[in-house]
Amino acid sequence: MLDILRQHRGLILAVMIAGLAGMYIHLMRSTPTYMAGTQVVIDTRQERISPVEEVVSNLAVNNSVVAGEVETIRSNVLIGRVVDRLALVDNPAFDPRLDRGEGWLSRIGRLISGGEPFHIRAAAMPPDALRAMVVQRVQRDMRVTQVGVSYVIRITYENPDPLLARDIANALAEAYVGSLLDNKRDATLRVNTWLSERLVELSAQVETADAAVVAFRTEMVAKTGGSEEVTGQLMAELNSKMVATQAERADAEVRSDQVSYLLERGGTTAVADMVTSPLLETLHRQRSELAAQQAELGSTLGRRHPEMVRITAQIGDIDRSIEAEVRRQIEALQVNVSIARNREQALAAQIAVVSDRLDQIAHASVRLDQLLRTAEATRLVYENFLSRFKETSAQGDFQSPEAQIIEKANLPTAPSSPRVGFSMMIAAVASLSFGIVAAFGRSALRDPVRTADDLREATHLPTLAALPHIARTRGGPTWLERELSGVAPTAFMEGIRSVRARLLEEPEFTRPRVVMVTSSLSGEGKSSICHALIRSLSDVGRKVTLIDMDLRRSDSIRTLGLDENGPDLIDIMSGRKPVASLLSGGMEFSAMLGADILVPRQRSDRAADLISRPEMAEVIGLLRQRYDVVIVNAPPVLNLADTLLLAKHTDATLLVAQSGRTPMRVLRQMLMRLTDAGVPVLGTVLTQVRRHHAAARDVYGYNY
């Protein structure tokens, strides 16, 4: 990833500069605006003048309630009150009917649609539409937020006019608090009005219910002859009398039955002890006294004595009187039984009558209870409504809102936007991010080869060496001269030796004599590899030569420091000089390379035609006979036919790819062209590996 960033640092820097410049221009053209803010707190601690429940209950404050209040403040209803109060529709800063100019995009759109300018169309709009437009603008420029997790709501408004920003912010807070109070008052007034109407209805219902109860009671008393309570008391008295009468009748019947039984068995004497009366007690006492006298005189006087006869006669009279009294008492007992029975029957008849009356009263009581319950319920509802009416009437004159202003907006002294430092920082971060994204996007689209493994994966060929990037220095020898001098071992020349070893490891009869070095694109380092490979082969005693066949853009003269007037390959390829001239001074010796070279000293746009001439085969055949190895510096493969034509005269081809630059796709296309043409490829070389590249570990680890 760092490789990609370093490789595209120019793109990233350009994007950052463009982003910062664009932001700076935007900031310079922006109109400064001022922000004023006020704060309100939702407070449920209410003042109470009476311990009664309010019509509108206090808010059960939580985050959801605070969020709802925030949306209430942002509503067009509340903002509309502020617009009306401050007359913003006629304010020049908000009036849609004023000409404020239009951007070129808006003008083009209007001209295409054929419409009139906006301020002209606004002048024909109704007042409600103008008011709605101003409300939307105020809503757009205001911010309402909850302060942290508290119950405090911050209201801010931004406008180019600091005085107007302050007034609107304060007006929004005051309108919000006032709306809470107005809502309570309106709700209380509506409730009082509704309660008064209901009280009138309930009062009539109470009177109707009470009248129904009285009328039903009067009707019930008239039908039953008394109330339920009086009839119940009468029924209780009759039942008590009935019990006593039944007891008396039972006692009289028992005594009468016993007396009748004894009378039948023993006569009046047997029942004498069962009946009693004052007369019987007197007669029994007199008889006892006479019997005592008779017994006393009987001891001295005879039975026929007159005194004894008189006493006996008196005793007989008394006995007859006792018998008569006993019979009279028996008859009295029977009369008492009859009287008790008659009394019991009379009481039973009265009880039946009263019982029927109670049944009627019981049936009527059900309806009476219903009427009483209805009357009581109606009266209870009436009393509750009356009590609530008195409470709400007392609340109507004293109401307090659930929110209060804790901070009023002051006149802002410094503009809130544009925030130059912050905006530039954001622009820098955004442009840097965009530049990084662009770098990765560009890298993904190009998909360059980064490591030797990537190169092997793209070509399926062995990577013979990975060569480092050598920095160029000003003054003194060139970097190539330093590398070829052999003063000190370097990673670059060590990589070249690896390529040399691969060329020489083949048996003599199969070893390639003519090796072509090419690449997919220009500037990938193939010429430097050709020069270094020539020097490396020369150092081991090989007789080598270099043919620079890049006839379109050869740089060998500049790189090797050759004379401008030396032998020219173009003269031989074009037939202006014979091929045999190469044997007599036609080759040029390079001290830097330590070998003969053949380079073009003029450029030709007809390179493919020159390579196709017979002289090309003659030159290669001649050099093959005189030298152990012939290195051919070929032009890039893609978009040119030169390399494919040269490949017909070579034994092997060496492909060069630049680390971090050559796309994998291009490598595959190059290899496909060579494969389709039947060109044998010996291997690949990865060039210009920088220290931050992923392949650096395979190059800069050399330290032997």
Image: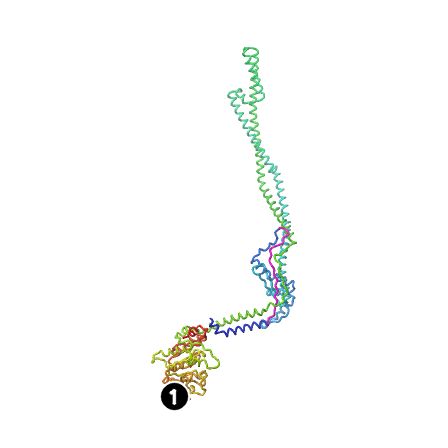
The amino acid type, in three-letter code, at marker 1 is Leu
- Under circle 1, the secondary element is helix
Question: To which quarter of the image does residue 508 belong?
Answer: bottom left
Q: Nearer the viewer, residue 228 or 88?
A: 88
In this rendering, position of residue 289 left or right of residue 510: right
In this rendering, position of residue 77 left or right of residue 498: right
The residue wearing badge 1 is 583
Q: Position of residue 420 (x, y in %)?
A: 58, 70
In the rendered view, tell whether residue 162 sits above or below residue 205.
Answer: below
Membership of 602 in magenta stretch: no
In the rendered view, tell whether residue 663 sits above or below residue 543.
Answer: above
Q: Nearer the viewer, residue 339 or 100?
A: 100
Q: Position of residue 593 (x, y in %)?
A: 41, 83
In the rendered view, tell whether residue 578 sits above or below residue 40.
Answer: below
- Residue 112 in sight here: no
Quadrant in which the C terminus appears:
bottom left
Q: Position of residue 197 (x, y in %)?
A: 64, 51
Q: From which residue to which does the magenta span run?
A: 29-51
